[in-house]
Amino acid sequence: MGECPVYHERQRLELCALHALNNLLQRAEITQRRAEEICWGLSPHSVINPHRSFLGTGNYDVNVIMAALQTLDYAAVWWDKRRSLESLVLSEIFGFILNIPSPISLGFLSLPITRQHWIALRQINGLYYNLDSKLKSPVRLGGPRELRDFLQGCISRGNCEILLVVTKAVEEARLWISEGERTT
């Protein structure tokens, strides 16, 4: 029996938030048109929308990601990086969306500056994958230990934000964190 293929959208324009959402969901759920509708719904009276690129090429902010997830009955929980990753209850977490620094390149030339970039991580068939749209294909991370090591590496490099994607019920009951950590 062959391995189940992993859905993976590749980077186009500044649509990494859209790609991160679709890669997390493992289907083409959020279109650029839908992301634009969400942007304008968040700031209906703005001349220049603060939730996306001025040029209209994407670069959607966290508010668009959170609103898109809410329309699908998911919630995004900001991870407090001061906490131990061991307190995550991985079985209750649908996936992760990270905002990480990413080098800018022009063709083969890599520039000495970075921009923030959205990526998704998710467990598929018992293994965690890095579904970064800038990768040629998904990268298998492995099990829970490898996932935590990857997350810790991102935190250690700095300028990284982590969103836990959970169902609304898991968010409300705070089941994504170990019981002893729920009150703090």
Image: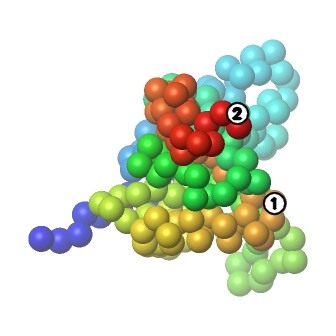
Image quarter of the C terminus = top right
Q: Position of residue 110 (x, y in %)?
A: 78, 80
Residue 52: % across, % down: 75, 39
Residue annotated with mark 1: 159
Instruction: Identify the residue at image location x=44%, y=43%.
Output: 92
Dot 1: what SS? loop
Comes first in the chain, label 2 or label 1: 2
Inter-mark Cα distance, 2 to 1: 18 Å
Residue located at (48% from left, 32% from top):
170
Question: Residue, x 55% and y 51% (percent of image)?
Answer: 88
Circle 1 packing at 10 Å, graded few (<14), some (14-19), many (20+), is few
Q: Is residue 105 above or below residue 71?
A: below
Q: Amino acid at mark 1?
A: Asn
**Residue at the disc numbered 2:** 63
Badge 2: residue crowd in 10 Å (few <14, some 14–19, many ≥20): some
User: Which residue appears at 76% of the width and 54% of the height?
Assistant: 82
The residue nearer to you, when weighing 69 against 148, is 148
Residue most extreme to the front = 180
